[in-house]
């Protein structure tokens, strides 16, 4: 078999061609709770993640969503929620606290508080079973969250 027929030989070497911060999503610990306004996700720095890195991420997510880039949450590769993309999806706001980054998902359009609660409960259960939750903006993985 020659190199042209073997996809492994034609793939670029990822670590050499991509900058480290974009290649590896940030690691964080996350808890999801329901409030009277919607679903609140509290993200605290995980291994090799600093508060400054989280602050940069918080501001970048805010800018990307303001510019219309949807932010998606996936658990074990299964899409759970897409924020700021379509009218029936929740609106999300991120802010920094002393403990880490807080993301508030608020129901908009056709999405109800019950749907958000169902998603919150499912994500909590999945993370409780060891399945990481990945947050992506556009198609770029930004964070990998565990309990």
Image (cartoon, rainbow, N blue to C red):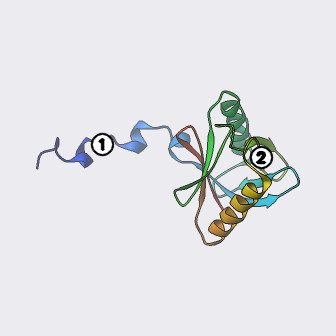
Q: Is residue 81 visible?
A: yes
Q: Quadrant of the C terminus?
A: bottom right
Provide residue 76's location: percent of width, then percent of height.
54, 61
Residue depicted at x 86% and y 49%:
37
Direction front: furthest residue: 110
- Report the residue marked by disc 1: 11
| Towards the viewer: 111 or 93 | 111
Q: Is residue 5 left or right of residue 135?
A: left
SS class, disc 1: loop
Residue contact between numbered discs 2 and 1, judged by CB atoms under 8 Å:
no
**C-alpha distance separating marks 2 and 1:** 42 Å
| Towards the viewer: 123 or 107 | 107
Residue depicted at x 71% and y 62%:
118
Direction top: furthest residue: 67
Tell me if residue 127 comes above or below residue 63 in the rendering: below
- Report crowding for label 1: few under 14, some 14 to 19, many 20 or more residues within 10 A (C-alpha): few
Provide residue 36's location: percent of width, then percent of height.
88, 54
- Report the residue marked by disc 2: 107
| Towards the viewer: 87 or 54 | 87
Provide residue 41's location: percent of width, then percent of height.
76, 54
Label at residue 141: none
């Amino acid at each position: 078999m020659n190199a042209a027929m073997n996809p492994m030989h034609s793939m670029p070497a990822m670590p050499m061609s991509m900058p480290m911060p974009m290649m590896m999503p940030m690691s964080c610990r996350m808890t999801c709770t329901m409030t009277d306004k919607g679903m609140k996700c509290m993200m605290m720095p995980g291994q090799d993640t600093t508060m400054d890195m989280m602050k940069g991420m918080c501001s970048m997510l805010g800018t990307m969503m303001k510019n219309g880039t949807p932010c998606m949450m996936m658990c074990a590769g299964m899409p759970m929620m897409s924020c700021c993309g379509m009218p029936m999806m929740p609106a999300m706001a991120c802010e920094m606290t002393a403990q880490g980054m807080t993301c508030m998902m608020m129901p908009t359009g056709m999405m109800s508080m019950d749907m958000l609660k169902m998603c919150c409960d499912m994500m909590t259960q999945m993370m409780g079973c060891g399945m990481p939750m990945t947050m992506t903006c556009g198609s770029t993985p930004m964070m990998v969250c565990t309990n």
